[in-house]
Amino acid sequence: MKNMNIKRKLQLKFAGVVVLFVVCGLYAYPQAVARFAPAYNFFDKFKINLGLDLQGGFHLEYKADVSKIDSAKVAEAMQGAQTVIERRVNAFGVGEPLVQISKSGNENRIIVELPGIKDIEAAKAKIKDAPLLEFKEEGPVNEQVKQMFDQSNAASKEKAQKILDEVKKGGDFAQLAKDNSEDPGSKDKGGDLDFVKKGAFVPEFDKILFESNLKPGDVYPQLVESQYGWHIIKFIESRGEGDALEVHSAHILFGKKDPSQYDQFKYQETGLTGKNLKSATAQYSSGQGLGEPEVSLQFDDEGTKLFAELTKKNLNKQIAIFLDGELQIAPTVQVEITNGQAVITGGYTFKTAKDIADRLNQGALPVPLTLVGQQSVEATLGADSLKSILIAGAIGLAAVIVFMLIFYRFLGLVASLALLIYTVLMITIFKMTGITLTLSGIAGFVLSIGMAVDANILIFERTKEEIRGGRTIANSLEEGFRRAWTSIRDGNVSSLLTAGILYLMGTGFVKGFAAALFIGVVVSMFTAVVITRTMLKVIISDWIHGRTWLVGVRKSDVSD
Amino acid sequence: MINIVGKTKYAYIFSVIVTVLSILSLFFWGLKYDIDFTGGTRMVIKFANEIPAKDEITGLLSEMNLNSLTLQNSENNSMVVRYASEDDKTNVDVWAKINEKYTDATQSSVDFFNSSVSGELKSKSINALVLAIMAIMAYIAWAFRKVSRPVESWKYGAGAVIALAHDILITTGVFSLLGHFYGIEIGIPFIAALLTILGFSVHDTIVVYDRTRENLLRSSSKTPFPEVVNQSLNETLVRSINTSLTVIITLLAMYIFGGVSIKYFALALLVGVGFGTYSSIFIATALLVTSYELTLKYKK
């Protein structure tokens, strides 16, 4: 009864091995049932996750400069940068990009991995190209900026006065204009402005020409201030009467600068930047007929809040959107916006609207990044590498099988079957777990094929010894499995230890290799010991008795 | 039975010579470090038709004043351009210069390590090596804790560690020679190979020691120790060689067919596994016998 149970158990185990082989085999090589679509689709569900070095792609490591960021906000800024880069690389639309933050000592890093890239530099430029997006509002000019302008204007006025004095002393007006005037249109002509009718110039200027009764050749004795700056005005001649009166004059201009003339000074920072933008899309405005192309913006939660405050505060005023410090558009706020959506119109063609949306989608990085490391492989080179290593693996596998058959004959055949099970089991594990298989990972796998039969060799050599010692083949096998186990265990522990340490060391090449080797060693202990043993127990019975050549032992070596 | 223990002398002489040569080569020529340890860029450029003369490329890049620029022809119409670099702008400029003249050329791969990254990789590698050696030593001490007669267990450990040091030293020495004569550089893959060799070499040594331990327990106390060791060696010889052979078969397949990227990694493993097998058969056990004989001498 007990015997029956053992036999029954063994049969179940053997059936388990067969099922494992068939199922894993199909997962590893679903093409085997390519003609039977439902089965093929079922087993083809899992794909090997190839590393960047095999499918082409790059691994970039950026160092973030957080020196200008409040230390409490560094983590937030890094996350912001991560989101922005993710958005940018997602736009490439190839493979599954990975963007992660890592810390190395005191340095904040961002790692970007992008598979399937053909043009390395172009893709890198797209990531690196970092437009700075800012939302600004109208507001009083910064005090410091104002002071700077005031100083420069005062100096300009002083100079104007000095030149006026020179003109009064009889200096050559035309020459002085040539040398000093800041009016590019007239300076080379000696300040000559030709004949004009009343109303052609700014009122301050007009008043001097038409109302101050200057005579031909006169220079107005004072500086005349206008929005452009300070003018020294010379009346040359006049013609016509009444409405047709025209005056020919010349001037020397000393420019005056107003910060509000400059976009970058006119608008003030609001704290709302590209990091708060969720997305931008180009669309046609809704309404009757074909709408007008516009850019629609969607903010994230924080951005929505900021934008609501901003629109409330700036009702009927402009909000300016800057990209890389350049004003893009400055729409006027019509209504407070609380849903975090904004629409920008401005007589765009659909293409310009789309360009703007694309640029906005690229967003802005909240921290400056410097590239400190790069590993990139162009796709065809990756494919070549994959081909070579697969060929090497196949040849290695075949050679190991031949070796086992020569040395261990029938036992070698069983070990080879176990090795095939090992191979398909490993491929299934790689597929199911989605472990990324790099070139070094496959190398570790191929190496593990050579190591996987180690346990079998230990067992079989032990078995051969026992046979030579006079035991029956079946008995010797039992003994071989039992006695070789401590060696197998102890020997593999050292391999597992180093593979574990390699994995923890954690750089790309090493990690892939170590993971494959580690899994390989564990799985091979199972296939070489449990699976081989089950198969041998089922197959080997009385028929093998005395046929020692089947296991590679010469009869003459067997002691009685 | 082959008298392996009796030939210890030759094994010692051979190992000492090879080890000393390795040390000398390391001392005089050192190792050629790859960019992942020194920092810099390696750019593989594939040309559409023919690989241009190296002078042309050197001339093209001369005004950039690149430090330690080397050019090397490779498979598939490719050229490997290496130079010291700290900033990615250098890489962009180099490629712009080359692409301007050879418009059909493409970048097959670009590896760039800023000195902060390479420094980090270097210290990580050293940490891993130190950690692995300590873990292996602890493991050996544990694995042989029960053996005591007639050689103390720590001596097994010491024997295994010396054999390990021997394998690692010779592998590194071989790559020092390869570096000096063929410009082969060592980087992270080499460290990975060394660690794998560590694991493998101990694996082999343990198999032999394990048998010695088993035979010691079984044999009568009258059998001389060197004889027990020799018997164990003979019993494990075939399997030591065979287990290594299957690994060597797969490594050879990778060395020959596996492609450029993996070639020298496979070679480092081949050298290490080869010497590892040799040292576990001829050195590790011989050391046990030698230490046993030395103890006998002192006792007299």
Image (tube, rainbow, N blue to C red):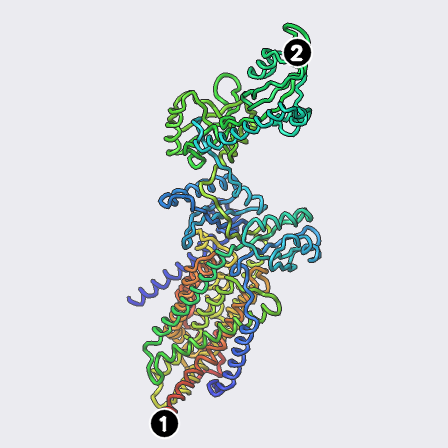
The percent position of residue A198, horizontal first and vertical second, equals 61, 11
What is the quadrant of residue A176 in the picture? top right
Nearer the observer, A120 or A307: A307
The percent position of residue A496, horizontal first and vertical second, equals 41, 65
Q: Up-down: is A181 above or below B71?
A: above
| x 65%, y 49%: residue | B97
Give the side of residue A236 with respect to residue A500, left or right: right
Residue A43 visible, this orientation: no
Give the side of residue A254 with respect to residue A140, left or right: right
Q: Are there few (<14), some (14-19), or many (20+) residues within 10 Å of tag 1? A: few
The percent position of residue A259, horizontal first and vertical second, equals 49, 28
Q: Residue furthest bottom?
A: B300
Q: Residue furthest top?
A: A242
Helix, strand, or loop for circle 2? strand
Parent chain of label 2 = A
Q: Which of the labelled discs sits on residue B6, or is there none? A: none
| x 41%, y 52%: residue | A103
Helix, strand, or loop for circle 1? loop
| x 48%, y 56%: residue | B116
Q: Which of the labelled discs sits on residue B300, or is there none? A: 1
What is the quadrant of residue A525 in the picture? bottom left
Assign the N terminus of chain A to one quadrant of the image: bottom left
Q: Up-down: is B242 above or below A330?
A: below
Q: Amino acid at mark 2?
A: Glu
Q: CA distance from mark 2 to mark 1?
A: 132 Å
Give the side of residue A226 with respect to residue A297, left or right: right
Assign the C terminus of chain A to one quadrant of the image: bottom left
Q: Which of the labelled discs sits on residue A246, or is there none? A: 2
- The reply to whether discs 2 and 1 touch (Cβ–Cβ < 8 Å) is no
The residue mark sitting in front, 2 or 1, is 2
Nearer the observer, A535 or A367: A367
The percent position of residue B76, horizontal first and vertical second, equals 65, 56
